[in-house]
């Protein structure tokens, strides 16, 4: 049976880049999205093609669910369970930026609440549900079995970088960063490794509105590797985890940021 991966927010951007890399490995995919059914269907079709070109036959399903809504999270897990007997990989990728970048002296609570709901509560409680399912499967398979599911959460350099015109996003990503040490600690006894990937500046719809600003910063030396990150850069990091290439590492933070995090003198 193929590996089975559930990727949240996989219709566009980084999630789509991750889905394509998993497809190339021959993994089945559940592509979650919020609203954009056309984009989700396109990603699913492109994943099937990518898998076929790599010599694999995979199953790809799409499922609309707002990860910020408890009922939608339940429905997403029910959908996955109705289609596959087990899950090998959860990627908590879905996330949103504030509608308006507002100075922290002016920003309102509604935007803060929205980002906490989607970017923190969503992955936190989706992980709880998925972890319970993975534990069930692990116990059914027996402790010696080769079933080693994994959980990956996509946070951001904003978890530790102060951007005063989107404090809500920074606080949400900093909070999200605690998910990985918590679940890594709790799930190690079940053979479930948990990782955080911290992307830097990645070319997606989310960064489209600030493209010129980041073009200038990158040209000015912001990142040691002087280019935009691409969704496939994040996808390849997830692919390494999915292939079990980090078996004795859990709770790790993997920076996919062109070296942005390095202190330089
Ligand atoms: P994006 O281009 O805006 O795509 C967002 C994806 O998430 C879409 O597939 C969207 O679905 C889905 N989504 C949004 N809200 C959702 C919800 N409530 N429930 C389920 N799915 C939802 O964003 P991106 O740049 O790829 O970002 C992906 C993740 O990486 C986010 O967590 C973001 O914070 C993080 N990140 C991005 C960057 C960057 O530079 N781009 C850097 C660091 C971290 P629809 O198509 O249906 O709208």
Image (tube, helix red, strand yellow):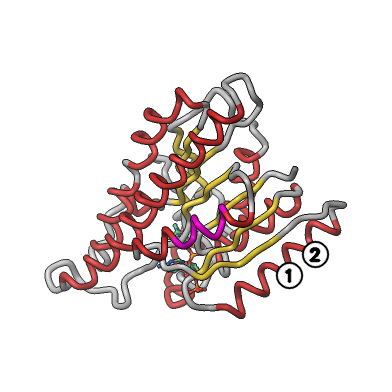
Q: Whole-Å distance between the Cαs marked 1 and 2?
A: 6 Å
Is 122 left, or right, of 34 in this rendering? left
User: Residue 226 lies in what quarter of the image?
Assistant: bottom right
Mark 2 surroundings within 10 Å by alpha-carbon count, few (fewer than 14), some (14 through 19), many (20 or more): some
Is 245 left, or right, of 190 in this rendering? right
User: Residue 243 lies in what quarter of the image?
Assistant: top right
Identify the mark at residue 45; answer none if there is no mark: 1
Q: Name the residue under label 2.
A: 49
Instruction: Inspect the magenta stretch and tell me whether residue 76 lies in it.
Output: yes
Is 54 left, or right, of 213 in this rendering? right
Q: Residue at x 36, y 57 (%)?
A: 122
Q: Which residue is drawn at 49% across and 42% down?
A: 133
Q: Give the range drawn in magenta.
A: 75-81
Q: Residue at x 65, y 74 (%)?
A: 41
User: Residue 111 lies in what quarter of the image?
Assistant: bottom left
Name above or below for residue 189 compared with residue 151. above
Looking at the picture, how far across and down is residue 215, in whole percent? 50, 68
Judging depth in this view, the residue of 100 and 78 nearest the camera is: 78
Describe the element under mark 1 as helix, strand or loop: helix
Q: Are marks 1 and 2 in contact (CB under 8 Å)?
A: yes
Describe the element under mark 2 as helix, strand or loop: helix
Judging depth in this view, the residue of 182 and 203 nearest the camera is: 182
Name above or below for residue 71 compared with residue 248. below
Judging depth in this view, the residue of 228 and 226 nearest the camera is: 228
Looking at the picture, how far across and down is residue 112, in whole percent? 22, 66
Looking at the picture, how far across and down is residue 135, in whole percent? 48, 34
Mark 1 surroundings within 10 Å by alpha-carbon count, few (fewer than 14), some (14 through 19), many (20 or more): few
Instruction: Inspect the magenta stretch and tell me whether residue 114 lies in it.
Output: no
């Amino acid at each position: 049976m193929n590996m089975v991966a559930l990727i949240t927010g996989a219709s566009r951007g980084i999630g789509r880049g991750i889905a394509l890399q998993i497809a190339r490995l021959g993994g089945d995919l559940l592509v979650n999205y919020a609203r954009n059914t056309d984009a989700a269907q396109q990603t699913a079709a492109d994943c099937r093609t990518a898998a076929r070109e790599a010599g694999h036959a995979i199953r790809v399903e799409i499922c609309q669910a707002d990860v910020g809504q408890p009922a939608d999270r339940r429905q997403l897990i029910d959908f996955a369970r109705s289609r596959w007997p087990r899950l090998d990989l959860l990627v908590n990728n879905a996330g949103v930026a504030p509608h308006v970048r507002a100075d922290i002296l002016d920003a309102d609570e509604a935007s803060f609440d929205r980002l906490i709901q989607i970017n923190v509560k969503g992955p936190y409680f989706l992980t709880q549900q998925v972890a319970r399912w993975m534990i069930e499967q692990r116990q059914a398979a027996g402790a010696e079995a080769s079933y080693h599911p994994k959980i990956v959460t996509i946070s951001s350099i904003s978890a530790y970088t102060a951007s005063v015109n989107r404090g809500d996003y920074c606080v949400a990503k900093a909070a999200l960063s605690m998910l990985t040490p918590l679940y890594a600690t709790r799930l190690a006894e079940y053979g479930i490794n948990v990782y955080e990937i911290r992307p830097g500046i990645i070319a997606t719809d989310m960064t489209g509105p600030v493209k010129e600003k980041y073009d200038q910063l990158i040209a000015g030396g912001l990142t040691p590797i002087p280019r935009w990150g691409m969704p496939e850069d994040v996808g390849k990091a997830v692919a390494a985890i999915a292939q079990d290439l980090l078996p004795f590492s859990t709770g790790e933070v993997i920076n996919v940021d062109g070296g942005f995090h390095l202190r330089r003198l």
